Amino acid sequence: MNVIEIKNLTKTYGKSRGITDISFHVEQGEIFGFIGPNGAGKSTTIRTLLSLIYPTSGSATIFGKDCIQFAPEIKKEIGYLPSEVFYYDNMKVKDLLKYSASFYKKDCSKRIKELAEMMDLDLNKKIDDLSLGNKKKVGIVQGLLHEPKLIILDEPTSGLDPLMQQKFFELLEEENKKGATILFSSHILSEVQRLCNRVAIIKEGKMVTVEKISTLQENNYKKFKVETKSALDPNYFTIEGVNNLEAKGNVISFLFRGNINTVLKKIAEIEIVNLWIEEADLEEIFMHYYEKEA
Ligand SMILES: Nc1ncnc2c1ncn2[C@@H]1O[C@H](COP(=O)(O)OP(=O)(O)OP(=O)(O)O)[C@@H](O)[C@H]1O
């Protein structure tokens, strides 16, 4: 069953564009990435799903039910972490979480303690005294305390240090193993790659593609930078799959798509001083998809 089904969703804010004709679905048990640069329309799509705003046209269902008509019922089964969290600063963390838990008809106190321990969050502190990252952790616990069937995360890692990000990802993987479906929005490709099975790419309010992460990786350019002892004719790397070949002094750089071993074999035959292999960034992936569409 599809947990989320979005059909031709469009939202305009007065004259300015929000999203145009967005369609995709998220299957039961998936960790689904929703990726695009700032202003692409990720939050608008998510807010529409949660019926925090209404679409101009199009529709969406969650658990097979219209997300506006059945909003109160659906929301009980959703854990949502907004991109920005705002709280009543005077409250203590434990009081805020107790208040959040009171919306659900189950005892969440044990789960709150477990989550706080896992995320290293002090429940006795006042919200006012927390750092940005710790406030984010409150949001995470708040989103997960009722063990939701669907977890919707809007740019969840901003403000978390790398160690906490790692713990948070492990927590999400655990929730997923227990059966939760996850929609994870981000502008950072690497975190989506690490966690998700499939990904929807959005740009300037429109869908670019929906792909399996494995397909994205296969089709993607890698950026190579090779530093040699003495200047080398860049044409040494003129092989199939190489693009944007450039030489600056003793450093040759290029983009490559294909079997990475072909390039590594070429590199092994020369004496190098340094080597950098990086993932293509989002812009380059978009370029690739626009080229395909053209
Ligand atoms: N309340 C609003 N009023 C007018 N325009 C808005 C409003 N909210 C969003 N927009 C516009 O809608 C478009 C999509 O914004 P949205 O916040 O959904 O993008 P996003 O992908 O979540 O980006 P970010 O990562 O920066 O939050 C942008 O052009 C933005 O300016």
Image (spheres, helix red, strand yellow):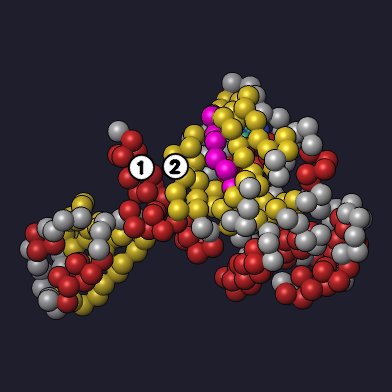
Magenta residues: mostly which secondary structure? strand
Check if residue 24 falls in the magenta segment: yes
Q: Which residue is mark 2?
A: 209
Q: Is residue 7 above or below residue 120?
A: above
Q: Nearer the viewer, residue 143 or 182?
A: 182
Q: Is residue 292 above or below residue 112?
A: above
Give the label on residue 289, or none: 1
Quarter where residue 29 is shown: bottom right
Q: How many other residues sit within 10 Å of disc 1, few (<14), some (14-19) or many (≥20)? A: some
Q: Residue 207's spot in the image, x, y percent? A: 48, 37
Name the amino acid type tagged 1: Tyr
Q: Residue 204's spot in the image, x, y percent? A: 48, 35
Are the residues tagged 1 and 2 within 8 Å (C-beta)? yes
x 45%, y 56%: residue? 213
Q: Secondary structure at mark 2?
A: strand
Q: Is residue 270 above or below residue 221?
A: below
Viewer can see residue 168: no
Q: How many other residues sit within 10 Å of disc 2, few (<14), some (14-19) or many (≥20)? A: some
* Residue at the extreme top: 15
Q: In the rendered structure, which segment of residues is drawn in magenta? A: 20-26
Left-right relation of 220 to 154 = left
Name the amino acid type tagged 2: Thr
Ligand 1 shown in quarter: top right
